[in-house]
Image (tube, rainbow, N blue to C red):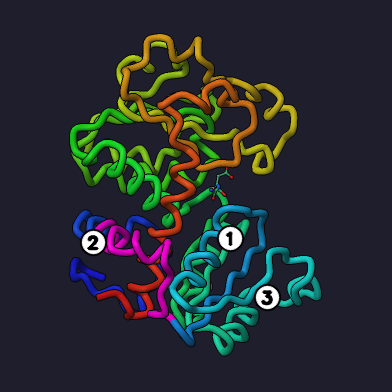
Amino acid sequence: MGGSLEFEGRDIISIKDFSREEINYVFKTAKTMEPLASKGSQILRGKILATLFFEASTRTRLSFESAMHKLGGSTIGFAEAEIASVKKGENLADTIRTVENYADVIALRHPLEGAARLAAEFSRVPIINGGSGAEEHPTQALLDMYTMVKEKGKIDGLKVAFVGDLRYGRTVHSLAYALSLYNIELYLVSPETLKMRREVLQTIKERIPVVERTSLEKIVPLVDVLYVTRIQRERFPDPAEYAKVKGSYRIDLQALSEAKKDLTILHPLPRLDEIAAEVDSTPYARYFQQVRNSIVVRMALLALILGAAK
Ligand code: NCD
């Protein structure tokens, strides 16, 4: 995209393809979607979104579908590869070359890294990456940051900590790249075996200060945003390795006793036991707000890609 603000017809494969100016433009557009999210709109009437989800999902798929419906468009797709022709051995390229005839835009989630990029090479309609293995989840990063802007007013100046599985968690990869375009400090807290991927670290360390730790204790009082993640059991090659790190971090009221008063806790969800239920009723907990914000961010992306956002 080379720096211009042309979104129409564009694929969203990696957050690395976005400039800071483009990210801000998505936020600006998302803000204009806020009233439409409650009263509805017809700006995408006649347009069809296909959601092809080859991996489990609740939020990403349903929020894309909800966003499309709120703008007057419609949706088709599958949420389980088991019921699609993939089950019969069809390859991804053929699936895409078929579905592009039925839809104006395709949201794809796939267990393989690089799947979204590959799909985009075959597709005549835009592809949105809804999660490509452990690699990236760009629309999640956008909604995570939109939530930070809503909670904190701006991203510049924030101290942010990521906690949990920084190796297999795709949301933290996209979010790290995107946050590194802003003036922030990043704390990475994970077990030794689940440290942030080297390629991500290399890129972000050239842009922002990064501190890596295995213990959360001293980090909590320092930060404005605590981004908690699930240990990605399904991506571990060896169950014994998962058993070693399972339950490594637990955010409960005790762990938050020295937190800043206006700390914001985010989580892409689903949560297992890494945030205790007792935290949900504190003003820190903003993870369900994040779910709410996902709608306007995805409305903005769909409207921009389909050339309907003014
Ligand atoms: C995440 C994902 O699928 O990567 N969920 C989501 O999209 N909100 C996080 C996870 O599965 O842990």
Look at mark 3 in the image and give the residue it sits on.
Answer: 91
Look at mark 1 in the image and give the residue it sits on.
Answer: 62
Reading the chain from its start, which is encountered first: label 3 or label 1? 1
- Foreground: disc 3 or disc 1: 1
Task: Please tell me how crowded label 2 is: few (under 14), some (14-19), or many (20+) other residues with Cα within 10 Å.
Answer: some
Main SS of the magenta part reads helix
Reading the chain from its start, which is encountered first: label 3 or label 2? 2
Q: CA distance from mark 3 to mark 2?
A: 36 Å
Q: Work out whether 84 lies above or below 191.
A: below
Identify which residue, 187 or 64, lies in the foreground: 64
Q: Find out if the beta carbon at label 1 lies less than 8 Å from the nearest ligand 1 atom.
A: no
Reading the chain from its start, which is encountered first: label 1 or label 2? 2
Q: Residue furthest bottom?
A: 101
| Residue 95 location (% of width, % of height) | 64, 79
| Residue 90 location (% of width, % of height) | 72, 77
Look at mark 2 in the image and give the residue it sits on.
Answer: 25
Secondary element under disc 1, as helix, strand or loop, is helix
Magenta-drawn segment: 25-44
| Residue 102 location (% of width, % of height) | 58, 87
Snapshot quadrant of residue 273 = top right
Q: Is residue 293 magenta?
A: no
Q: Is residue 180 left or right of residue 306?
A: left
